[in-house]
Structure formats: C-alpha cells, structure tokens
Image (cartoon, helix red, strand yellow):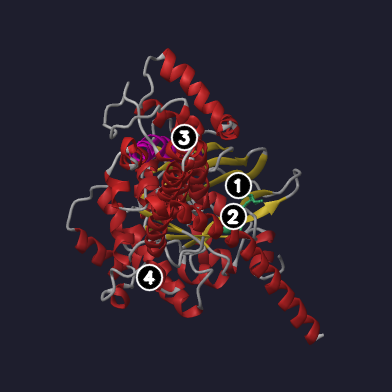
C-alpha cells in the first residue's frame, strides 16, 4: 500500500521550496506541498488528518489525510462501497445522526477543529451546505423549500429576494418563477435537484458538499448542474462525490481517489491519492488509480 | 388457462365481498336496532332535558367535556411522548418506554378504573370528579396515541431529517416544521381513534366520574360528571320501556359522536395528506 504523507504546514517553508504539483514525478504521492498551496489558494477550507471512521465495529474509513482548498471543485471518486458518502458526511457532521458511529482523527474546518467539544454541529452545518444523491425537497411549496431555512435562521434581508437570488443562482428561476407556490413535488427530478441546490445556497454557506448530485438525472439535467457548479465555484468551495469519471474530469480541479482495502481484513475505505484532476486522469501515481480510471476495476 | 384465471379472479372478488358483508352487516344492524329502539324518546326534549326528566342533555355535555379533557391531557402527553420516542430518545430509554407503554396498553380498563379510584378518588381526595375521570380515560388511551404518533414519525423518510440537518436547522424546528406535516395524518388518526375509544368506555368512569343529574361544570375536583355510557348502562337495568328507549338513545348519541369524530378526522387527514402529496414515503 502506498504510504500517504500527512499534510503538515511548515510555517518556515517558503512557497518556492515546494515542488510544483503538476510536475511531480509520478512515483511520488501527489499531495502537494501545503505551503505552496497556501500561497496560491489561501488556507485550506478542510484539513483532514488521519481520519478513521467506524459504523459500530466496522471500520469504514482508514487513515484519510487530505485537504480541500477554497473555491475549487474537489471530486471524490472510487468504487461503490469505498466510503465516499461516509467521508463527505464527515465534513458536515451528518454522520452524527447515525447512532453507533465513531470518528477518530482530526477534521479542521476553516482552521478550527470540526469535532471539538464545544463545536455546535447545527451552526456549523449552516456554513456547509449539502446536496444529496436523491433530490429530497421538503413536502412544501417551491418558495417555502428555499425560504424555510433562511427564515428560521433569522437571516437578514428580504426573504423574497433571497428566494429569487438562490433560484436564479441554481438556474431554476425561469422555470418556476410563475409557480412558486406550487408543490416542490410538481417539479421534475432534475428541477428538484436544482431546487435542493437553491435551498442549500439560500443559507449562504461557504462550502457545498454534493453526494452524487446527478446520479438520478438525465444528461441534459446533468449538464445544467455541471454548468451551475462551474459558476458556483467562483464563490463557493465544492466537494462532489461522483461515479461518473467524465464528470469528475470535466468539472473538478482536484480529484481524490478512494478504494476498498481488504488487506487488513474487512472492507475498509482508504484514499489512494489526491491531486490535480488532470494529473490523476493522465498520470496517476498509483497503479490502483490507473486501473480504476482505465476501467480495469469494478 | 384464461378461464382458470377468470375463475380465480371471481373467487377472489367473491371472498372480498363476503368479508365486507361480514363486517358491514353486524355494524349496520347494530346501528339500525339502536336507533329503532331509541325511537320512542327521540325528540327535542332528549337534548334539552336532563336525566332527571327523561332527557340526556347533561350526559351529552359531560361526555363531550370528558372528550375535550382526554384530548388535552392524553393528546398532549401522548403526542409529545411519541415524538420523543421516535426522534429524541436514546435506544435504551426507547426500549424501556416501549415496554412500559405496552404494559399500559394491556391493562384491562376496569383495572385502570379501580386504580384510579384507589389513588385519585380516595387517596388524593379528588372525589368522583372530572379530573379523576379524565386522568383514568387518558391513561387508558395514552399508549395508543404514543404508538400511532411514534409510527407516523418513523414513517417520514430519513432523507428529510438529513436535508434539514444539512441546512443547520435545530432538531426541535425540524420536528415541528419538517416532520410534523407529513406525519400529521397518522397522528390525527391516532387521536381520533383514541377519542372514539374514550367515547365508548364505561369501566374506568364507573370508578372515577360518578354521575349527576346536573349539567357538568368546569370544576375539576369534587364534582361528579354525568356521561352517556352510564345512561345506557343504568337505564338498561331499570324496568320500563321508556328507560330502555333512553338507554338506546344515549347509545345512539355515543355512536353519532364517534361517527362525527371519524368524519372530522378524515377531513383533517385528507387536508394533511394533500400537503404532502407526491412525496415518496
Ligand atoms: N448507516 C450505515 N451503517 C452501517 N454501515 C454503513 C452505513 N452506511 C454505509 N455503511 C458501510 O460503509 C461502507 C461505505 O459506504 P458508503 O456509503 O460511504 O460508500 P460509497 O463509497 O458512498 O458507495 P456508493 O458509491 O455505492 O455510494 C460500506 O461498506 C457500507 O456498507
Ligand atoms: Mg455513496
């Protein structure tokens, strides 16, 4: 198994001293030098160090170390059951809802521990939006789906404006502006998913986590959501889980490849490598990555 | 082959029809005979005279008052308990509460009445009273409300909870604003059935409500409460056609209350369902 170096910020290292990410020799793990990252991207939004995740006794993720950079799209790819969903839900503490789960290691969000003793998960989740695999609008009107959370969180500003702005941003406004009071279920699947995106951005998060947002959608709807992500990237940090390798290649700046490791008994998710999307897809440093992206795996 | 299928089809429909008749016929015949027996006393005076003057006004008012009491006491505690079980309680506490609730559900109503008498009426010095009666009835229907509420909330898909959590909504608001609307129709049905059961109960009230020829008041303690099932029970034991007719009339009014409750419940659940139509449950 390839040893992944954990990310440590060396304050004394200058950006120039780190190797350029895309020119790394392919035998080297492709985690880039953090100081260099910091200089070009600002501090990481998420910094995950040695994360282990358990469902009861079942170790689902082992020793994950990676960072998520601001205003980039990071895609997580890997075979089914390798823990992508589990991982992305560690980033907004959504696994807290599942009884019997346990997390070890460190997850930092915006420089602070996400799982610290006095962190309030609820307030955190307002800063970290999530879009799920299956569109899951509330059984309420289109308007209410978007307005509900801003109203409850007592956000400043005119609610109608927030709703319009979010729907415009999610590229849904033109299709629904004349029927805002209609049930969210009267929309098509793709429209519902964009409504869920609007709902997520209405609370003005800093990050949007997307777990296979297009898996239930046709190519046209998928294309619209990809366009949308490209646009959202200017203001938000996006993490997307996808099974669609072309999608990862198309939209993301960085790609992390996860896989299932059975070498220590049990099926455990591990991260094989993370790097610039172009590099992962053209010159991966690990054989397993290459096998997967060339379709020689599962 | 086709003929065989047709035959099976017909047999199935025949059996379904038979089952329907088996259920509908007894209910209809009961309703019919109750109304038929009540005919001699059916009239305006039934509703304007009290039981000392061959009417049942006080018993109707008392029964309605008891229903309101049960709705307030058992309704709030039961719904809150069901929501707590489904959404908040840790697994161990859930098991304990569920066991407790099952024990309560299995308790014969006469036992509930007797315990109510020994504790509330005698030990607490409440006397035969509205409060004692409401508490006894509430204990009887509480497990039912808890269960239906819990089940209704559990049926709401987890994806809604996750969506709400992902937006940073607090649990309490999630329950109230997101989960309650889709759960509402089930909760309402549970409440309605609980009220219907209360309407027909006699045993727990015999020991706790007492009876009175006066119209009931809002006095919680030390004032006995008249109610319909008591009229049916006592007047049937009295000699004379008129008393028997009054007993039947009280039963008919009880039935009418139940029918109205069910109709009102239907109306409300239909409205609640309309709000969540199209949701994959
Ligand atoms: N709620 C849960 N309870 C117990 N085990 C779970 C739970 N959710 C996931 N797992 C297990 O954790 C492992 C990782 O699952 P996860 O859903 O994270 O995979 P995934 O990479 O998202 O797969 P897919 O691509 O199919 O969505 C699997 O072995 C799965 O069985
Ligand atoms: Mg998944």
Label of residue A4 in the image = 1
Distance between mark 3 and mark 4 Cα atoms = 75 Å
Distance between mark 1 and mark 3 Cα atoms = 85 Å
User: Taking A102 as reference, is A42 left or right?
Assistant: left
Q: Badge 1, how many Cα within 10 Å: few under 14, some, many 20+?
A: some
Determine whether the residue tagged by mark 2 lies in a helix, strand or loop: strand
Residue linked to disc 4: A228
Q: How many marks?
A: 4
Determine whether the residue tagged by mark 3 lies in a helix, strand or loop: helix
Q: Residue A278 magenta-drawn?
A: no
Residue lying at 37% horizontally and 70% vertically, measured from the top left: A228
Task: Where is residue A129? Give x, y as percent.
Answer: 39, 54
Query: Is residue B93 in sight in this rendering?
Result: no
Label of residue A273 in the image = 2
The residue lying toward the viewer, choosing from A146 and A108, is A146
Residue lying at 29% horizontally and 33% vertically, measured from the top left: B216
User: Taking B143 as reference, is B257 left or right?
Assistant: left
- For ligand 2, the image quadrant comes to bottom right
**Chain designation of label 2:** A
Distance between mark 2 and mark 3 Cα atoms = 83 Å
The residue lying toward the viewer, choosing from A259 and A131, is A131
Determine whether the residue tagged by mark 1 lies in a helix, strand or loop: loop
Q: Are marks 1 and 3 on the same chain?
A: no
Task: Where is residue A163? Give x, y as percent.
Answer: 26, 63
The residue lying toward the viewer, choosing from A176 and B249, is B249
Q: Are marks 1 and 2 on the same chain?
A: yes
Label of residue B234 in the image = 3
Distance between mark 4 and mark 2 Cα atoms = 27 Å
Q: Residue B77 magenta-drawn?
A: yes
Q: Are marks 1 and 3 in contact (CB under 8 Å)?
A: no
Nearer the N terminus, badge 4 or badge 1?
A: 1
Determine whether the residue tagged by mark 4 lies in a helix, strand or loop: helix
């Amino acid at each position: 198994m390839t040893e992944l170096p954990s990310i440590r910020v060396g304050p004394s290292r200058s950006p120039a001293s780190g190797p350029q990410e895309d020119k790394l020799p392919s035998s080297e793990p492709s985690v880039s030098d953090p100081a260099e990252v910091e200089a070009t991207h600002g501090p990481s939004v998420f910094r995950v160090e040695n994360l282990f995740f358990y469902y009861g006794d079942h170790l689902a993720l082992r020793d994950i170390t990676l960072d998520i950079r601001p205003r980039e799209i990071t895609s997580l790819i890997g075979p089914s059951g390798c823990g992508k969903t589990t991982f992305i839900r560690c980033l907004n503490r959504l696994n807290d809802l599942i009884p019997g789960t346990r997390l070890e290691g460190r997850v930092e969000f915006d420089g602070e521990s996400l799982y610290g003793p006095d962190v309030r998960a609820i307030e955190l989740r307002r800063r970290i939006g999530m879009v799920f695999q299956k569109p899951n609008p509330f059984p309420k009107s289109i308007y209410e789906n978007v307005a509900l959370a801003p109203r409850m969180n007592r956000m400043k500003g005119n609610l109608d404006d927030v709703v319009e702005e979010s729907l415009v941003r999610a590229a849904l406004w033109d299709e629904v502006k004349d029927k805002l009071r209609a049930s969210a279920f009267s929309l098509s699947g793709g429209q519902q998913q964009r409504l869920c995106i609007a709902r997520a951005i209405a609370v003005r998060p800093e990050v949007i986590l997307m777990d296979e947002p297009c898996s239930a959608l046709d190519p046209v709807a998928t294309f619209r959501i990809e366009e949308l992500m490209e646009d959202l990237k200017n203001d938000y940090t996006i993490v997307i889980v996808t099974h669609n390798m072309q999608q990862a290649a198309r939209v993301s700046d960085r790609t992390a490849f996860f896989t299932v490791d059975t070498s220590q008994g049990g099926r455990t998710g591990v991260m094989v490598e993370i790097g610039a999307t172009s590099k992962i897809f053209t010159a991966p440093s690990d054989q397993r990555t290459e096998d997967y992206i060339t379709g020689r795996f599962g | 082959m086709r003929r065989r299928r047709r035959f099976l089809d017909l047999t199935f429909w025949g059996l379904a029809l038979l089952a329907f008749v088996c259920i509908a016929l007894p209910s209809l015949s009961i309703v019919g005979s109750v109304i038929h027996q009540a005919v001699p006393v059916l009239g305006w005076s039934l509703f304007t005279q009290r039981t000392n003057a061959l009417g049942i006004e006080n018993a109707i008012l008392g029964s309605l008052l008891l229903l309101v009491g049960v709705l307030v006491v058992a309704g709030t505690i039961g719904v809150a308990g069901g929501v707590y079980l489904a959404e908040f309680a840790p697994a161990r506490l859930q098991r304990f509460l569920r066991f407790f609730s099952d024990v309560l559900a299995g308790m014969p109503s006469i036992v509930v009445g007797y315990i109510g008498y020994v504790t509330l009426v005698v030990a607490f010095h409440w006397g035969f009273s509205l409060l004692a009666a409401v508490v006894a009835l509430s204990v009887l229907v509480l497990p039912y409300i808890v269960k239906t509420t819990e089940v209704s909330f559990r049926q709401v898909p987890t994806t809604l909870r996750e969506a709400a959590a992902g937006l940073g909504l607090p649990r309490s608001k999630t329950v109230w604003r997101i989960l309650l609307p889709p759960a509402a129709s089930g909760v309402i049905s549970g409440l309605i059935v609980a009220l219907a059961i209360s309407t027909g109960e006699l045993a727990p009230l015999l020991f706790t409500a007492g009876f009175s020829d006066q119209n009931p008041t809002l006095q919680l303690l030390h004032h006995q409460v008249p109610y319909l099932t008591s009229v049916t029970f006592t007047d049937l034991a009295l000699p004379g056609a008129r008393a028997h007719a009054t007993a039947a009339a009280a039963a008919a009014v009880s039935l009418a209350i139940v029918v109205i409750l069910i109709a009102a419940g239907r109306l409300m659940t239909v409205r609640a369902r309309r709000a969540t139509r199209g949701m994959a449950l």
